Image (cartoon, rainbow, N blue to C red):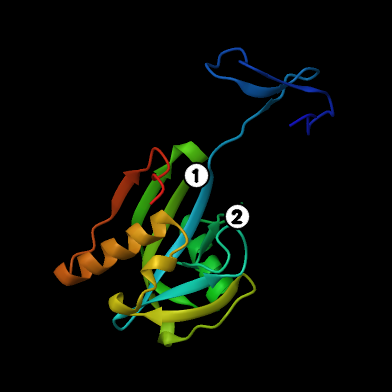
Amino acid sequence: MKFCSECGGGIALRVPKGDDRDRFVCNDCDYVHYINPRVIVGCLPVYEDKVLLCKRAIEPRHGLWTLPAGFMENGETTEEGAARETWEEARARVSHQRLYRVFDVPYISQVYMFYLCSLDDGLFGVGPESLETALYTESEVPWDQIAFPVVEETLRAYFDDRRRDEFPMAVKAIRSRRPPA
């Protein structure tokens, strides 16, 4: 950040009065520009004994599989954002959403929120951010082609929970990148 969006003045990284950490502050009007974590919302859509996955048509992780998810937009709830992302990526409508997994990932300043839900009528398609979409049983999931660790962890938890027929909401902090395999 180089210029203030309020007045156009120059920006400096400093601790503003009454704060305890560096922030981007305008040298002219003293406006504090907060940069906060990004929230990623998505769904784990289920139909019969299968989950809906999307093959990414965009970076990062182009060509790998993920749950339908993306950045939350201003003016929407996390649940609305998750449903919107599912429509955008998989042309699927969902219902019976309930918060299932939350991942705090401070090393990249992101928070992931996945909703367990029903895939309405088993209908889905391919949105502009997906190369393809498909329903998978646990044994059919392309485990070696999953795009993100939080998606793999969410899927594995779901299949474990399904065996017990209990689906508790869980929160986990991921403090660092996984070591290379």
* Amino acid under disc 2: Glu
| 176 shown above or below 12 | below
Rendered view: 117 above or below 132: above
Name the image quarter holding residue 97. bottom left
Compared to 108, does 66 lie above or below? below
Q: Are marks 2 and 1 in contact (CB under 8 Å)?
A: no
Name which residue lies at 78% across and 20% down.
29
Image coordinates of residue 50 in percent, x first then y, are: 33, 80
x 34%, y 79%: residue: 140
Task: Give the image location of residue 95, x and y in percent.
Answer: 41, 74
Residue 124 image label: none
Q: Amino acid at mark 1?
A: Gln
Label 2 sits on residue: 73
Give the residue at the far top of this rendering: 17
Residue drawn at point x = 27 percent, y = 61 percent:
157
Residue identifier under label 1? 110
Q: Position of residue 133 (x, y in %)?
A: 50, 79
Which quadrant of the figure contains the N terminus?
Answer: top right
Which residue occupies the extreme left position in the image?
164
Q: Nearer the viewer, residue 35 or 81?
A: 35
